[in-house]
Image: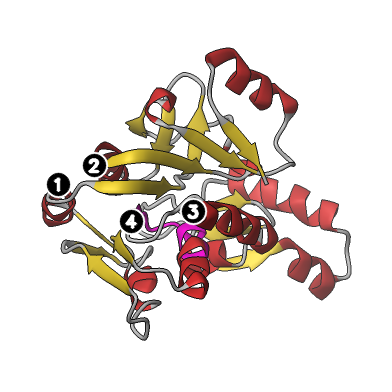
Amino acid sequence: NGFIMIKDLSSRFAVTEETIRRDLNKIVEMNIGVRKAHGGAYRIHQGDLAAPQSFRQIMLPGIKQRFASFCATLILPESCIMLDSSTTSRFIANKLKEFNRPLTVITNSIATAGMFEDNENIDVVCVGGNLRKLNGSLVGPNAIATLEKYCADYSFVSPPSLDPRFGLTDHSEEEARVRACMINQSKKRYLVADHTKFGWSGINRIAGIETIDLVVTDSEIEQKWIQWFKTIGMQYKCC
């Protein structure tokens, strides 16, 4: 499946998780196409640095559930929302399905769109485009063209990284363009990012932090980031 969890390796080889982390660091330094992520490691697929969707789906589920519960309370009935292709957005989509309010959901994620196939109260627009197989998302000029036809009430984006200088960034140029377009086409823009995403950057810039209306993060975030939010006047919520 292209990924492995540290706890599974620890159990299999009867060594501590710290030992596994040290060994993984050595493997990553060998530059043979392996990359570390929170709780495990994964194989880089055809130059795409993003973690596989199946791996990200099992990372930090408790935090993502809290994010989803909070984000769902921000959305009024009859609203139009944009959800990116992140697994965090999939958790939000699941919560919206539970609430069963009348909504329009626009997404470039095939999995997220499919979650509403049996829900009559929620209309779904799945953008066209080229399939990014590793992520199960639709990207490219056709995806952008679809998004630009809409004006959403809210957008929720959860890119891989956030840097004080460069703002929101992504491994994928095409995914970055889709997220930037979602931000541009929305009245209220929410960044939903757990503590592991702060302090580093991908090579593709999405948008500056000033484009975001509210940062939703978790209680494990370092205090220096909270101080940064206060310094720049950014609204935030720790779940």
Q: Nearer the viewer, residue 48 or 103?
A: 103
Q: Nearer the viewer, residue 29 or 196?
A: 196
Residue at left 73%, top 42%?
Answer: 219
Q: Give the residue type at disc 2.
A: Gln
Horizontal side of 61 relative to 71 (left or right) equals right
- How far across and how far down the image is residue 40, in percent? 66, 58
Give yes or no for contact between labels 1 and 2 (Cβ–Cβ under 8 Å): yes
Mark with earlier residue (1, 2): 1
**Helix, strand or loop at disc 3?**
loop
**Helix, strand or loop at disc 1?**
loop
The residue mark sitting in front, 3 or 4, is: 4
The relative height of residue 116 versus residue 70 in the rendered view (above or below) is below
Q: What residue is pinned by disc 4?
A: 79
Mark drawn on residue 33: 3
Report the Cα–Cα distance between label 3 and label 4. 43 Å
Report the Cα–Cα distance between label 2 and label 4. 14 Å
The residue mark sitting in front, 3 or 2, is: 2
Q: What residue is pinned by disc 2?
A: 185
Q: Give the residue type at disc 3.
A: Gly
Q: Mark 2 packing: few (<14 Cα in 10 Å), some, or many (20+)? A: many
Mark drawn on residue 148: 1
The residue mark sitting in front, 1 or 3, is: 1
Q: Mark 1 packing: few (<14 Cα in 10 Å), some, or many (20+)? A: few
Read off the magenta span. Answer: 81-91
Mark with earlier residue (3, 2): 3
Give yes or no for contact between labels 2 and 4 (Cβ–Cβ under 8 Å): no
Report the Cα–Cα distance between label 1 and label 2. 7 Å
Q: Give the residue type at disc 4.
A: Ser
